[in-house]
Amino acid sequence: MNKQKTIVFGGAFNPPTIAHEDILKECVDYAGRLGADVWLMPSNSRSDKRILVSLNRRIKYINAMIQDVDNMSVNIEINKHELQKQGLIKTIDTVMEFERLHPDRDFEWVFGSDSTQTMGDWEGGDWLLNNLKTLIVMRPGSDINPQLRYVRKIYVQERDISSTELRRRIECGEAFEDMVGGAVRQVLNKNTPPF
């Protein structure tokens, strides 16, 4: 049985910037060549990242980002799997649950090259390094962990932009329009902090 290829791009997307859109565009381009789907998976709060914005607002942000990107007839969906979980979420748990819940799909997971450096230290890290199919966003000055077995690379324009800086600008009343796409800007203009 041929499995449906699916690219999983996870992140806080709080809010999504044009840097996120750049990655999504590359994922869509790659998916289009394979006949794959793209799933955007907003992460829940983690030990290193607390997310205070409501679920509904985050979904609005992500839908707006999807509007800002030409989907090139690629199916792009929001997957709420991690948002519906309680407690600390580990990558290995999500990967194993996706394998169990979607046996008809062949997943590739999007990571920044910088994050692969510590992957061996994560719970289940050895298994991830040896088995996880990855689509790696190359970051300046950061190599891919040489132990990672299944790697495809994508390259995006280097931008000194982060959601943290975007939130800071909005909270301080500073201009932020250059950091986001048009549909995301409209959502942000209609909604005020807190994030």
Image (spheres, helix red, strand yellow):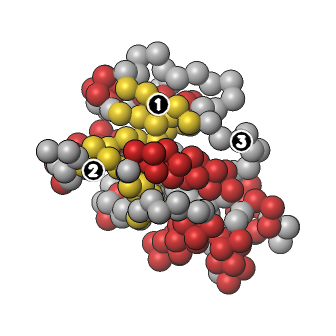
Q: Position of residue 33 (x, y in %)?
A: 45, 45
Q: Residue at x 56, y 36 (%)?
A: 154
Dot in front, 3 or 2: 2
Q: Secondary structure at mark 1?
A: strand
Of the residues shown, which amino acid type is indicated by label 1?
A: Arg
Viewer-proximal residue, 105 or 60?
105
Q: Is residue 138 above or below residue 66?
A: above
Give the Cα separation between the discs numbered 3 and 1. 17 Å
Q: Earlier in the sequence, mark 3 or mark 1?
A: 1
The answer to whether residue 16 is visible is: yes
Q: Position of residue 182 (x, y in %)?
A: 71, 71
Q: Earlier in the sequence, mark 2 or mark 1?
A: 2
Q: Quadrant of the C terminus?
A: bottom right
Q: Residue at x 48, y 71 (%)?
A: 59
Farthest right residue?
174
- For the image shown, how many numbered marks are present on the structure? 3
Q: Position of residue 117 (x, y in %)?
A: 50, 24
Q: Residue at x 40, y 22 (%)?
A: 148
Q: Are marks 2 and 1 in contact (CB under 8 Å)?
A: no
Q: Which disc is residue 157 wearing?
A: 3
Packing grade of label 2 (10 A; few <14, some 14-19, many >=20) is some
Q: Is residue 141 above or below residue 10?
A: above
Give the Cα separation between the discs numbered 2 and 1. 18 Å
Q: Earlier in the sequence, mark 3 or mark 2?
A: 2
* Residue labelled with disc 2: 4
Of the residues shown, which amino acid type is indicated by label 3?
A: Gln
Viewer-proximal residue, 71 or 82?
71
The answer to whether residue 47 is visible is: no
* Residue labelled with disc 1: 152
Of the residues shown, which amino acid type is indicated by label 2?
A: Gln
Q: Quadrant of the N terminus?
A: top left
